[in-house]
């Protein structure tokens, strides 16, 4: 199980770091992607476009490194649930928009489809499994603990 949770941590962490990169460098395009969902007023979409990428990159990096894995997995799980809800909303209302997940609108993959719902559902489950099952193996936190404090069944 420890190898599966490590794989889940690396997958979700890497995905969140990767997804945050373009958003950090082009927050105005990301704000437009958020506005396309028609769920937030413009002022909140601007705030979200400036804060979400930093939360994503921090939670992702912490998962990769194994620092505060449970709180980081809680954040990624909550964010995946919100992203999934927004995608389901856009799909069900027929919005012809790009999901805004991994690139700029100029590199848009087109309209949100069933694939996006299935993908985000699977990623939500992976993030949730890391939250529930990760015991801190292969983590920087465990590595930095004194040898006497490391226990095979003690979460870090």
Image: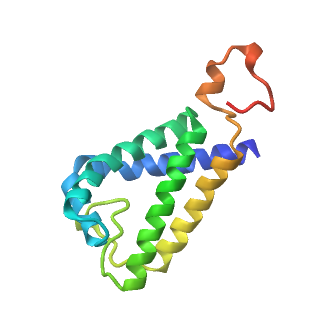
Residue 47 % position (x, y): 25, 51
Residue 104 % position (x, y): 26, 61
Residue at the spot 56% in from the left edge and 60% down from the top edge: 123
In the rendered view, tell whether residue 121 sits above or below residue 54. below
State left or right for residue 100 relative to residue 148: left
In the rendered view, tell whether residue 16 sits above or below residue 99. above
State left or right for residue 37 relative to residue 87: left
Q: Nearer the viewer, residue 116 or 133?
A: 133
Residue at the spot 22% in from the left edge and 52% down from the top edge: 26
Residue 116 % position (x, y): 47, 72
Res. 43 image quadrant: bottom left
Res. 89 image quadrant: bottom left
State left or right for residue 47 relative to residue 8: left
The colour style of the image is: rainbow
The quarter of the image holding the C terminus is top right
Residue 134 % position (x, y): 68, 42
């Amino acid at each position: 199980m420890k190898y599966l949770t490590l794989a889940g941590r690396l997958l979700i962490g890497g995905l969140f770091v990767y997804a945050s990169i373009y958003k950090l460098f082009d927050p105005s395009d990301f704000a437009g992607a958020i506005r396309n969902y028609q769920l937030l007023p413009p002022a909140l979409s601007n705030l979200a476009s400036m804060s979400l990428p930093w939360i994503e990159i921090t939670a992702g990096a912490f998962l990769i490194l194994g620092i505060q894995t449970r709180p980081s997995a809680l954040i990624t799980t909550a964010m995946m649930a919100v992203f999934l809800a927004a995608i389901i909303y856009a799909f069900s209302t027929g919005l012809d928009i790009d999901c805004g997940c991994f690139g700029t609108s100029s590199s848009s993959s087109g309209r949100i489809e069933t694939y996006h719902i299935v993908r985000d559902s699977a990623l939500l489950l992976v993030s949730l499994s890391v939250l529930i099952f990760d015991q801190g193996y292969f983590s920087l936190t465990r590595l930095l603990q004194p040898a006497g404090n490391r226990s095979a069944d003690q979460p870090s």
